[in-house]
C-alpha cells in the first residue's frame, strides 16, 4: 500500500479538471501618456462530475490573464446535483444583469443544446443532456453569471425531501408524475 502526500493529491485533482477558455478580449484604457493595452480572459473549469467554477483575469499578456482566471475559477467552484450523472433534476431559470437563461432537463441522447459560454459550462460540469436558451444579453460575462445563478438554484430530490420532512421516493414519484403529464 503506497501513501500519497497532499501535494500529490493536489496534482492529481488538477489533472482531472476540464478547463474551457470562454473568451479573450483586448481591453484598452486611455491615459494621459497614451493607451494601456491589456487582455481580459474568462475561463470555466470543472471536474466533469458535478463541480464547476468560473473566473475572470486581466493582465498585459494573454497567458497571465488565463492563469489568473483559472486560479479564480478553482477558488469559486460549486457543486451541482445531477440526475443520473447526465442531466438536471428540474427546469430552472437564472438571471444576472440584462441576461437571463432557461435550463431544461432532457431525455437521454438529446445532447447539449446550448450556445457559446453555456456549452463550455455544461461540458466542464459533466452534463450530457440539457436544453438551454439565453435571452436578453449576449455578453459572455453576464451569460456565464446567469447560468451559475441558475445552477446554484438547482436542488436534488434529497435536499427537497430533507426540507419537507419526507422520503426521497415520494419526491421522485411526484416529479415523475408531473413529467408524465407534460
Image (spheres, rainbow, N blue to C red):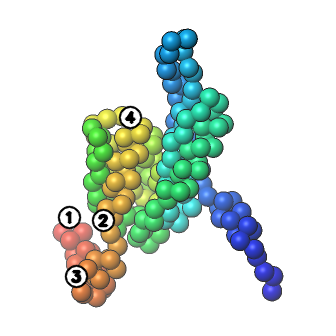
Label 4: element kind: loop
Mark 4 crowdedness (10 Å alpha carbons): few <14, some 14-19, many ≥20: few
Which residue bears the numbered disc 1?
A: 182
Inter-mark Cα distance, 4 to 3? 38 Å
Which residue bears the numbered disc 2?
A: 90
Residue at (32, 42) in percent of width and height: 134
Closer to us: mark 2 or mark 3? 3
Residue 161 percent coordinates (x, y): 28, 82
Q: Nearer the viewer, residue 168 or 113?
A: 168
Q: Nearer the viewer, residue 125 or 61?
A: 61
Inter-mark Cα distance, 2 to 3? 17 Å
Q: Which mark is residue 139?
A: 4
Label 2: element kind: loop
Residue at (66, 36) in percent of width and height: 63
Q: Is residue 20 visible?
A: no
Examine the image and state in which quarter residue 12 appears.
Answer: bottom right
**Going from the N terminus, do you reach mark 1 or mark 2 first?**
2
Closer to us: mark 3 or mark 1? 3
Residue 29 percent coordinates (x, y): 49, 20
Which residue bears the numbered disc 3?
A: 164
Q: Is residue 80 visible?
A: yes
Residue 11 percent coordinates (x, y): 71, 63
Residue 24 percent coordinates (x, y): 54, 33
Residue at (33, 64) in percent of width and height: 154
Examine the image and state in which quarter residue 64 appears.
Answer: top right
**Going from the N terminus, do you reach mark 4 or mark 2 first?**
2
Label 1: element kind: loop
**Going from the N terminus, do you reach mark 2 or mark 3 first?**
2
User: Pointers 1 and 2 in contact (CB under 8 A)?
Assistant: no
Closer to us: mark 4 or mark 2? 4
Q: Residue furthest left?
A: 181
Amino acid at each position: 500500500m503506497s501513501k500519497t502526500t497532499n501535494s500529490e493529491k493536489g496534482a492529481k485533482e488538477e489533472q482531472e479538471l476540464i478547463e474551457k477558455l470562454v473568451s479573450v478580449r483586448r481591453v484598452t484604457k486611455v491615459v494621459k501618456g497614451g493607451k494601456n493595452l491589456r487582455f481580459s480572459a474568462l475561463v470555466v473549469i470543472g471536474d466533469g462530475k458535478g463541480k464547476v467554477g468560473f473566473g475572470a483575469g486581466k493582465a498585459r499578456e494573454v497567458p497571465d490573464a488565463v492563469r489568473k482566471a483559472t486560479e479564480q475559477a478553482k477558488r469559486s467552484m460549486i457543486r451541482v446535483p445531477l440526475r443520473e450523472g447526465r442531466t438536471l433534476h428540474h427546469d430552472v431559470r437564472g438571471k444576472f444583469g440584462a441576461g437571463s437563461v432557461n435550463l431544461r432537463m432532457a431525455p437521454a441522447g438529446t445532447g447539449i443544446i446550448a450556445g457559446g459560454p453555456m456549452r463550455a459550462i455544461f461540458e466542464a460540469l459533466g452534463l450530457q443532456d440539457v436544453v438551454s436558451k439565453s435571452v436578453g444579453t449576449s455578453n459572455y460575462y453576464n451569460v456565464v453569471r446567469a447560468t451559475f445563478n441558475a445552477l446554484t438554484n438547482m436542488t436534488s430530490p434529497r435536499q427537497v425531501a430533507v426540507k419537507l420532512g419526507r422520503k426521497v421516493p415520494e419526491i421522485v414519484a411526484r416529479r415523475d408524475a408531473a413529467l408524465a403529464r407534460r
